[in-house]
């Protein structure tokens, strides 16, 4: 219990550190992210899917600019070579500081801690953006996001086909690059969410959210010897979720180096 308490204190102090250092910038100029644009129009199927995760909290005053950047990346798809797929994971270690984030989960804090160990960080913090499980930086940093997404778009990825019917999702994964044992994850995400914050650092503000992870779970394992997998899973929706705003994100992640080996998404409406 003492160890857990110390870890909790470290994550709180790291959150304060990030929030105190980061001032809230104006909304990013997304035209800056189009580096080396080609004159040809690249179709979506020719783009490389790149997973962008944002660890955030409604209790952190530096997080709203990062939330807006994530939303812009998702909506505007500014990189000509990448299909940007986003996840907003609301951590729970800010909840004791005046405002409980209803979208937060200890599971997402745990996931961020795993990344912290992988990146050899002394402390975790918010907002933190992680691209394809390999690059991390302060989540409102446009130039770092640009560079990481551009680099990830050059990497080989598995092909993931998703088919949903009623409450069933079929997953077909092929051509997985060389890897150690890996996990197939399914994330339920929801757009068009907003919160009127009544306490904490963002008290009095109305915060809008995109790609909020409502649930994250493992739906399969790929051994180091496998380069393909077919599976299916039953979809269970909570009453508070609006189906028209939901999307399903499936990704394969190497258990050893945390690299994203493939990712795809599908809407439900």
Image (tube, helix red, strand yellow):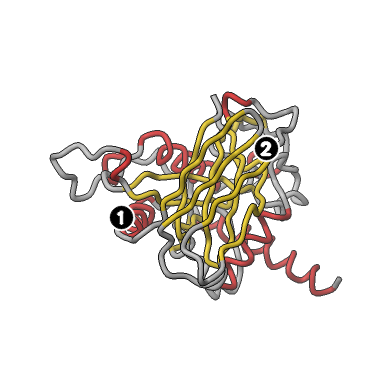
Disc 2 to disc 1: CB gap under 8 Å: no
Q: Residue visible at 65% across and 44% down?
A: 233
In this rendering, position of residue 252 left or right of residue 232:
left
In this rendering, position of residue 9 left or right of residue 220:
right
Q: Residue 10: which quarter of the image?
A: bottom right
In this rendering, position of residue 135 left or right of residue 95:
left
> Residue 151: x, y in percent?
32, 60
- The residue closer to the viewer here, 166 or 46, is 166
Q: Residue furthest left?
A: 39
Question: What residue sits right under mark 1 in the picture?
Answer: 150
Q: Is residue 264 above or below residue 237?
A: below
> Residue 250: x, y in percent?
54, 47
Q: Is residue 165 above or below residue 212?
A: above
- The residue closer to the viewer here, 79 or 163, is 163
Mark 1, other Cα within 10 Å: few <14 / some 14–19 / many ≥20: many
- State the quadrant of the N terminus: bottom right
| Element on which disc 2 rests | loop
> Residue 242: x, y in percent?
64, 25
> Residue 137: x, y in percent?
46, 60
Q: Residue 6: which quarter of the image?
A: bottom right
Question: What residue sits right under mark 2 in the picture?
Answer: 235
Q: Residue visible at 43% across and 39% down?
A: 74
- The residue closer to the viewer here, 54 or 254, is 254
Q: Give the number of the disc on residue 91.
A: none
Q: CA distance from mark 2 to mark 1?
A: 33 Å
Q: Residue visible at 22% across and 49% down?
A: 35
In this rendering, position of residue 244 left or right of residue 161:
right
């Amino acid at each position: 219990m003492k160890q857990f308490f110390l870890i909790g204190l470290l994550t709180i102090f790291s959150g304060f550190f990030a929030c105190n250092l980061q001032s809230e910038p104006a909304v990013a100029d997304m035209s800056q992210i189009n580096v080396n644009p080609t004159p040809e129009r690249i179709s979506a199927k020719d783009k490389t899917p790149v997973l962008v995760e944002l660890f955030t909290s409604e209790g952190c005053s530096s997080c709203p600019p990062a939330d807006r950047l994530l939303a812009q990346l998702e909506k505007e798809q500014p990189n000509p070579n990448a299909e940007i797929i986003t996840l907003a994971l609301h951590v729970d270690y800010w909840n004791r500081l005046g405002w409980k984030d209803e979208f937060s989960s200890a599971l997402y804090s745990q996931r961020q801690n795993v990344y912290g160990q992988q990146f050899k960080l002394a402390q975790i913090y918010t907002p933190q953006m992680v691209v394809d499980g390999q690059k991390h930086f302060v989540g409102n940093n446009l130039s770092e996001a640009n560079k990481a997404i551009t680099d990830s778009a050059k990497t080989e990825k598995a092909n993931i086909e998703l088919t949903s019917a009623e409450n069933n999702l079929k997953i077909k994964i092929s051509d997985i690059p060389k890897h150690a044992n890996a996990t197939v994850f399914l994330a339920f995400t929801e757009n068009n969410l907003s919160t009127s914050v009544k306490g904490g650092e963002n008290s009095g503000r109305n915060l809008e959210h995109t790609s909020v992870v409502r649930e994250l779970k493992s739906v399969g394992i790929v051994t180091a010897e496998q380069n393909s997998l077919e599976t299916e899973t039953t979809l269970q929706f909570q009453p508070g979720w609006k189906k028209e705003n939901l999307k399903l994100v499936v990704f394969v992640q190497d258990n050893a180096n945390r690299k994203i080996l493939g990712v795809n998404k599908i809407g439900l409406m």
